Image (spheres, rainbow, N blue to C red):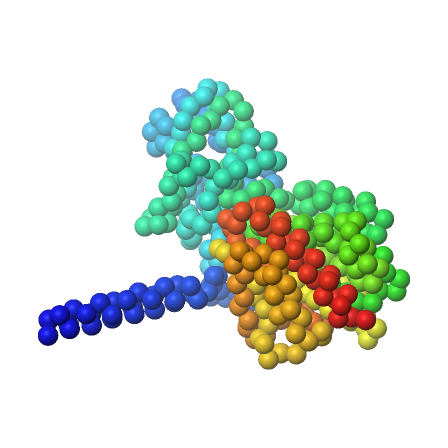
Amino acid sequence: MLLKFNIANVFLLIFLLFQNCANDYFKPLHYDPPGSTNTSDKTIQFQHKRTIGFQNASLWVSNEFDGARLNDFFQVNDSTYTAIINPENEPINNSAWYAFKIWSFKKQSVSIRLTYNNGDHRYHPKISKDRISWQRLDSLFYHPDTVNKSAELQLTVGPDTLWVAAQELLVSKDFDRKIDNFAQYPFASKTLLGHSKMGKPIYKLDITEADPVQGYVLIISRQHPPEVTGTLALFSFLETVCNDSELSRAFRKRFCVSAIPLMNPDGADNGHWRHNTGGVDLNRDWFSFNQPETRLARDVFLETANHEDKQVYLFLDFHSTQRDIFYTLDKNLKTIPDGFTDKWLNKIRQAFPHYHLRERPSGTGSPVSKNWFYETFKAPSITYEVGDETDRQLIRQVASGAAIAMMELLLEEIK
């Protein structure tokens, strides 16, 4: 009997472990804190921009640049420091962004503990010596503390500035430069839609050689400031649409890709964790449209494509989360073209057989962008999520392959 009891316990333990793993795998990759769907203005706290110096250690840190997030920084001992990171307001989705630059008149090693208020550590630190080329901090010098929800970094600093950030820095000036580069193509045009809550310009990029346009692909990106990997995928996707391949030329002669690459310039430039400067998650404002950024996008896409002879055939919203995943529509919802999402994802799977493509279908109850675009245009509407730490080359390859699959399918299906 003892043997049977032990075997039963073993099977029970295996079952519980499997159940826990399954629950962990299928648990949501994000959460909505209380009040997130109330998109009326909320008060935010702007961080104090300054350079903090420690004369005794010959060390300086600064948050005086776009995209920075460092609320305080103090010395513990000769070589140990604490960085305080606060969100713009709370409650807030736990996407704790940090970014600062550090230097010293003498070469030295320092230990910095990242400490968060109203959040915990999420992003593996990235470092750069020029703000352009970035690399992950070697794991030997990075120690996340899951108990205290913080992290400790060991850095070697000297007279040359070292940039430290949760992800690569891509702020509004970087987007402006990239959009201008796209606009150099004879078949691309840049339009100023209006301005954000703080008065920053918001641009739309149109890519087409069609006259008249037979159909639209609508794209938005960077509603949430820290979601840089989604931006990397977006740029690769658009570059593929713009290349000189026979496929891309044929696609551009019939279709128009209309994109708003940076929906939240205020949040990106102010180093926000999640919100715009109205203290609102823009991707919960696609029902009420209380914020100027979502209203601009709604109005221009309605004006562009809400006509009988101007069909929208696909909507994509580029984001980032803990791992790559495509949030799609419930399979029972009919789209134009019907069944496009399954065909598109299967094409991506075939092109990248070793890439783990996750899909999460859902209904249209929540006030997020993909649901509004489906209800408005009946188009396949997808939130394209890219993992925080997905290999950057793989991000670009898969996004390029996704663009190729899209162009092939639309040219096949829309005669």
Measuring 58% from the left and 49% from the top, which residue is drawn there? 394
Q: Nearer the viewer, residue 200 or 101?
A: 101
Q: Nearer the viewer, residue 408 or 141?
A: 408
Quadrant for the N terminus, please.
bottom left
Quarter of the C terminus within the rendering: bottom right
Name the side, left or right, on which 195 lies relative to 92.
Answer: right
The picture quadrant where one finds residue 301 is bottom right
Front one among 243 and 154: 243
Q: Residue at 64%, 69% (x, y): give it.
A: 343
Residue 73's place in the image compared with 38, above or below, is above
* Quadrant of res 344: bottom right
State left or right for residue 52 relative to residue 339.
Answer: left
- Residue at 71% in and 75% down: 336
Q: In the picture shown, does residue 184 fall above or below 218?
A: above
Residue 132: x %, y % from top left: 61, 36
Look at the picture and state if 324 lies above or below 1. above
